[in-house]
Every structure is written in C-alpha cells, then in structure tokens.
Amino acid sequence: MLIGISLAIAQAVQVTGVVVSAEDDMPVVGASILVKGTSNGTITDIDGKFILKVNKGDKLEISYIGMKSQTVAAKNNMKVVLESDTEVLDEVVVTGMQRMDKRLFTGASTKISAEDSKLDGVPEISRALEGRAAGVSVQNVSGTFGTAPKIRVRGATSIYGSSKPLWVVDGVIMEDVTEVGADDLSSGDAVTLISSAISGLNADDIESFQILKDGSATSIYGARAMAGVIVVTTKKGKAGSNKISYTGEFTMRLKPNYRNFNIMNSQEQMDVYKTLESNGYLTFADVYRASNSGVYGKMYHLINSYDAKNTRFGMPNTPEARNAYLREAEYRNTDWFDVLFNNSISQNHAISMTSGTEKASYYTSLSVMNDPGWTKQSKVQRYTANLNALYNISKKVSLNLIGNASYRKQRAPGSLSSNLDPVSGEVKRDFDINPYSYALNTSRALDPNEYYVRNYAPFNILHELDNNYMDLDVVDMKFQGEFKYKPINKVELSVLGAYKYSTTTQAHKITDYSNQAWAYRAMDDATIRDANPWLYTNPDVSNALPVSVLPVGGFYRETKYGMNSYDFRATASYNDVFNENHIFNFFGGMELNATDRTQTWFQGVGLQYDMGMLPSYDYLYFKQGNEENAAYYGVSTTRSRDVAFFGTATYSWKGKYTINGTVRYEGSNKLGKSRSARWLPTWNVSGAWNAHEESWFENLRPALSNLTLKASYSLTADRGPAEVSNSRVIINSYNSYRPFASVSESGLQITELENSELTYEKKHELNIGAEIGFLDNRINLAMDWYKRNNYDLIGIINTMGVGGQISKYANVASMKSHGVEFTLSTRNIVTRDFKWNTDFIFSNAKNEVTELDANSRVIDLIAGTGFALEGYPVRSLFSMDFQGLNGQGLPTFINEKGEVTVSDINFQERNVKDHLVYEGPTDPTITGSFGNVFTYKNSLLSTKNGQG
C-alpha cells in the first residue's frame, strides 16, 4: 500500500507553458488548459502563461474561442501556437483603445476582415462597407472620388447634427479637413470632394474593420460616439515573416445607358414641343431673346442671322425649311451618356513589404491609383505611403511607430454652390455643368456639336467642360507613436501621441471662352442687355445702362483648407485571474484632442488664360462688390479642444458570466460656459452569458455549438451640429451695407449671444442580443434588438426677443428609435480545395421625432433631403398635393389655403402644413444583403445583392 502511494506521488509533476497566437505571436489570454479525460485544468494569464500539475504521460487539451483547439503531450516549458479558426465568429474585438477577448465583450459590434470587405476597383474604403454589416447603411450619394458616402449606424441620432459615425484608425480619431453636414454630401457642392477623412487610406493596407454599434461598445468614446464608431486596423509586420507583395487592379466602368431611365427620346420630346408651339408657346418673341433656349431658339437665331458675304440667312424662313430643321432634331436622339462618359479603365498598384523578428517588425507599403475619369474633365491620381514599425525593446517595453501619407491630384467639372429660392420654391445651381445631371435633364433633340443659348450666351457642354473645371491638390499625413511599459506582470501602461496634417487647394478655373465668362458680357441687343442679371448698372450715374464688369478674361477662384490635429492619450490596464475562475480587467486613462482648421479663399477676376495668365480687371467689378457688400476674399479659423477621463472594468467568472461598466467624463470648448453644460459624464452597464461554456452544454453539441446572450444600457452623447459654438458671445466684423461705395464703413456685430446653458445631445440605449452557432459553427446566427431615447437634441427656437435674439439654439428636441438586426452566416461546402460560404444580412430601423419646436418652413420640408417634423422620422420628405393638369396643361396643387392653384403657393409658410403630403423618410428603414463567396484553391468569386 505504501509503495503504491509513493509511486502515484512520484508521477505527479508541474508543467509550465505559454500559449500564443499564430497570427501575431501575441499571448492568448484566458485560453483553457485541460488535462484530457479529467476536470483538472486552468487558464492562461495576461502573458498567455500557465502552470498545471499533471501526471506523466498526460495529454493537454488547449482551446480558445476563435482558434483551433490542440491536444499535445504535457511537458515543461512548452509553447503552444494556436491558429485562427475561420469556422467561428470573430474572436477578438478591437475598440481602437483595447483588444478584448470576445467572451468578455458585452457590446454589439461587427468585425469585417479586409478580405471580406475589399471591393476591387473601389479605392474609397468607406464605400466597401455597403451591405457588409447589419444596421449599417451606406448611401453613395456621389460616385466622385473623395466624396464621403452617407453612413448611418442604426439610423440618425440628431436632427440638426450630422449623425456621422466616428472613424478611428489605429487608435487615433480621424478628423475631416472641413466639417460637411450629412445633408450637404448630396448637394454636389465642390467642398464635398474633400469630405472624406479616410480617402487617403489604401485598401490593401487595411487589416480589418470593427463597427461598434451600441452604447456598450462605443461608451469608451463618450460624447464622440453617439452615432457609432468604425475602427480601422491597418496591417503590421510579423515576427519570422519576410514577404514582398504586389497587388494590381484594372477596373473598367461602362457608360450609363438610357435604358435604365424613364426619359423621353427626341421624337417624344419634339412631339411635346410641337404641341406647345400649336398652343401659342415657343414663339419667336418668347424664345429668340430668352436666357436659355434649345432647338427652337437655335432655329430662330438661324432664321434671323444674315451672312452679308454670302448674301443669305442662316436658314430660310419657310414652312418647308422649318419643318426640315425640326424633323432633323426629331430623329437626332442624342445619347448624352455616350457623349459625356467614357468606358474608362482605372488602375491601382500597391506593393508592400513585411519583415520581422521577435525584437522588431516592419510593414511598409506604397500605392499608386490612376483613374482617367468616367466623365469628361474627371480624373484622379492618388499616391500613398505607409510605415508601421514595432520595436520590442525588452519584455516590458515596446514602441509602435506608424506613419501615413497620401497625395491626391484630381480634376472635376466646374461647380458652384446650389441655392434655394424660398419665394419661387426653385432649387438651382448657376452654370451647372455636371455631366450626369446634364445627361439626365437635357433634351436629346440637341446636337452635341452645336452651340445653343444659356445665360444669354453661347453654350455647348463639351466646350464648357474644356473651359470650366476645378483642379484639386490634397495632402494628408498622420504620424503616431505608442509607448507601452509593463512595470509588473499584470499591469500595462501606455502613452499614445499623434499628429495629423491635411491641406487642400481647390482651384476653379473659368477661362475667357467659357459660358460663365461670356454671360458676364452678353448684351447682343438692348433687350438682352436690360434682362441679363450678370451685368452691372452704376447707381452713381443717372440713366446709366448695364455694362459688363468682365470685358475680357475669366475667373480664377482658389480655396484652401488646412487642418492641424493633435492627440494625446495615456492609459493603464490591469488584467488578472484569481483562483483560476475569476477574470478581472480594468482599463482607464485620459485623452486630449486639439484641432485647428483654416480656410482661405479669393476670387481672381479678369484673368486672361490665353495671354499667359495675364490679369486685366475692371474697377467696376470691385465697385459692384462693394455696393453689394460682397467679399472677394476671406479667411476663417476655428479651434476645437476636448479633454476626457475614462475607465472601464470587466469581471467574468470562468468566462461564463460577464459584467462590464464604463464611465467617461469629458469637456469641450464648443459648448456652454457653465460646468453642467460644458462637462458631461457618460456611462454604460452591460452583461453577457456564454452558455456554451456551461458543462451541460456539452449534451447539445454538435447540433448547438455556440450560444451567447448579451444586454446593455448606456448613456452616450454628441456635441451637436458642427456650426454650433456658443461657449462665449460671438462677435464678427462686417462691412455695413450702404447704397453708395463712397460711404461704406466696417463695424462689429453680435452674431450669437453667449448661450451658457447649451449642452450635449444625449442618448439612452437598451440593447439585447444573441449569438448562436449550429453544427460546429457551420451555421452562425447573430441577432440584436435595440431601443433608443435621444433627448436634449439641439434645435432652433423662436423667442420673444428677450436678450436680443428672436431665435437661438437650445436643447429642445427629442426623438425615439428602435430596430432589429439579423445576420445569418453559413458554410455550405468545405473541402480541401473548394469552399462555399453564404451571408444573409437584414436590419430594420425606425425613428420618430417626439418633440421639436423648429417652426420650419414649407420649403424646408419639400426640398433637398427633407427635414424633421414632430411625429415623423428625422429626415422626412413631403410634397405638394398634386391635383393633375389644368385645361392649359399646367400642374395644379393644393396650397396652404386649401385652394387648387398653379403658382399661388407660400413656400415660407411656417404655421399651416396640413396640405403637405408625407412621402416617407429619405434614410432607408430596411437594409440588407445576400451574398455568396466561392473559393477554389487560390481563386475566389464573390456575389452580393442588397442594401436599402
């Protein structure tokens, strides 16, 4: 008996080891180490290490969620390398500040690998998120490079604010060079070409996206993340890897086709014109001197033009000649898409180099993108460079240095800002030459080689595109460094600093021979001279006639945007495992953000492009501007400062039951002066149950292989609209209006009074979710339901004038929203050479404005992207109640008086809106996609349909 006992004791030994990830050679925290066939086991600590007593000959089963399990023989000082298991859901959640074990993460998020998100031929990485994640809608409002898509994470969160998600790249918040509202993205204005903060990132440098949706996931960012967070992780070097990679993409875009649009052909259009002519319209008197004219205007000009040399008119004024001319236009059927678009081939070339040892690893890349342009005068060249260096100075100290730079040279058709006439209800853009808009809205009876009349001057779209265009030069740079130190085994201290620089020069060139320049000197006769709004009548001269302020030359309009941004963050983390069952994580710190933006612009007038760029200006141009109190140059500077303190704690018992709490306290110089307004605490409480870690769950395998239930409740916030900044009284200088330039004077005016009680917009959110895996995770299902209550939203209220303002910003609005998200992923076929995966994504989000005292006008509700009205969604679109055509063929509507009318409509009505017809929200409420990925050896075929 004694001998048997001594032998048993002798066989028991203590083994030590470390578990690391094959992907990045980093320690795997919380990996399960179990003696096969027994309940004896442990889990790895913060450094991936473990100690376990075993008997000689025992085998260890090592497992970790998201990685392939291994069974190895027990021995001392063992190193186990676990490989990523693509059969399970994403194993690590990256929040931009932390990397968390998914078992300990209690929020709602979606991870998208670069391989799954990359769309060949789409160099703008934000567009690649379309249809990739439930609850995320991506509206590509413009196909022009540099224009940010309209992205919503679980719908709108503000009425006047942008509701744009926060972009975080390698832990650093990315700021836009200029703040463009979400509604302005679809305006077509030139500033939208630089509205994307991440257009300088090369898609080949992206490792993954992590989209943080609910308050539990985003709470660490507090008042910056009410609209969600998109975390981008770029590639880095790996120890033991030396590799050079090249990627070449060639993408061809075909011209649009009229078959996809319900637009009349030239024969149908001429039939309408003939009907108008027979009813007394399109007469010589109406069209010959009109500001804009087409086929009939050209015909009348030919009839009225006399060639003295050949002693004949441009066209005989006979019924036969007129009919022949109109018949030619009837059968012309110009394909403007074919004229203005190209079957272009864009190229994207990238080369990357990866190398590393246990002491240092590097990732560098260079890329060149060349897009010759889908339309005339539309082309882009972009160059990027990236460096990511990681130095493991010692076991306790590491340094990560990252540098990114990009340069973009772009050309686009000339564009002016759109404007809205609240009297006539017309939304227009002067001198609009957007090729897509022109192709859709221009008569197909016109000859693309002929000049017609626009703005009282000759106009041909091809000629105008050659003489009216914009050149953009964009430079983006980001440098960051992160220093990490482990004073003891379970504690890590980190300091991160980053500097971002961006500058854009936008030169709008309007040459001497453009329609825009010609319009400023169009006065062929007295009728046109008196009607042309681009001419100037000198008020200092009695009975003066209109004259041109641009007798020669054109315009050169240059706008420069600059941004300098600084970030500093200091954090401390503590991770420990007590008694092999109790997992505790703490993460806390503070951060500072500073952003300085500048904008300068000027308008050069009378520049003679064909005379060596020689300026020749007329003093009347400046005299007119002085009388109209219009500036010809401007400089503006804005400064944003933010500071925050944050902390989050997580406790988990055996990885089964997890609770989390987060608090953040921050302040911003953009809001009111009072402490209660400028400073705000945000918080989150959440929990998760990993049922698959329960012992009884083994009886359900393999039919049911994964089950996690989550719930969270949070308070997050946002600073509101970008233009709101009332921490102090805002006093601007101005030039007072006077009828004569000689008596003008400058002054100071109070633009906004101090609004010290104006504070953050806030959101309470409840989220309940579940993740379920079937058949060894061959089928994965993720579901989330959420309910939001947004309050203290900033809006404009009308006052009695007390304090000197009849309207001001205040926290007066509120809204509620709810939604459901559903993601189903299946691995239909998995063999050595062939794989077939399917993804089905669906989400439904609805919101309603519950309180709003905006007193908006009718024109605000029916124009553009719509507006908010109490009891309706945030972006609701209304229309006039159409009553059909009257006897003269003119459209009729119900006005605010309840009368049927053609034009008697008060678009500035604020009180009576019952006559408007609700058409629905402009933001999609249902989004989804269905996609398949087929892989055969090294070949891949991907198909995806959907969005909302």
Image (spheres, rainbow, N blue to C red):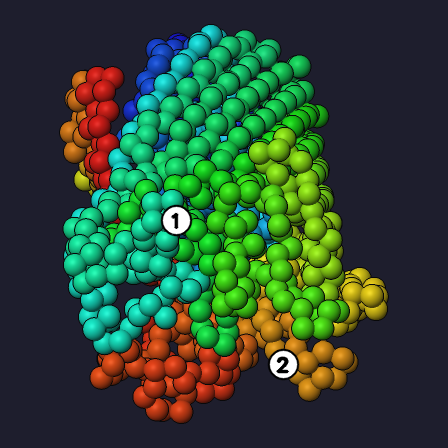
Above or below, comparing residue 859 to residue 150 in the picture = below
Res 530 quadrant in image = bottom right
Question: Which of 472 and 226 lies nearest the eye of the viewer?
Answer: 472
Above or below, comparing residue 132 to residue 358 in the picture = below
The x and y percentages for residue 210 are 45, 39
Above or below, comparing residue 668 to residue 864 in the picture = above
Residue drawn at 24 percent across, 71 percent down: 276
Binning the other alpha carbons within 10 Å of mark 2 as few (below 14), some (14 to 19) or many (20 upward) gives few
- The amino acid type of the residue labelled 1 equals Ala
Q: Which residue is mark 1?
A: 308
Q: Which residue is mark 2?
A: 798
Q: CA distance from mark 1 to mark 2?
A: 66 Å
Residue drawn at 78 percent across, 65 percent down: 741
User: Count the marks: how many?
Assistant: 2
Q: Secondary structure at mark 1?
A: loop
Residue drawn at 55 percent across, 41 percent down: 511
Question: Which of 616 and 640 lies nearest the eye of the viewer?
Answer: 616
Q: Earlier in the sequence, mark 1 or mark 2?
A: 1
Q: Say whether residue 203 is visible.
A: yes
Residue drawn at 69 percent across, 61 percent down: 624
The x and y percentages for residue 661 are 56, 51
Question: Which of 270 and 36 lies nearest the eye of the viewer?
Answer: 270
Left or right: 790 in relation to 84:
right
The quadrant of the image that shows the C terminus is bottom left
Q: Say whether residue 19 is visible.
A: no
The x and y percentages for residue 501 are 66, 34
The x and y percentages for residue 290 are 41, 65
Q: Secondary structure at mark 2?
A: strand
Question: Which of 937 and 280 lies nearest the eye of the viewer?
Answer: 280
- The amino acid type of the residue labelled 2 equals Asn
| Label annotation for residue 858 | none
Binning the other alpha carbons within 10 Å of mark 1 as few (below 14), some (14 to 19) or many (20 upward) gives few
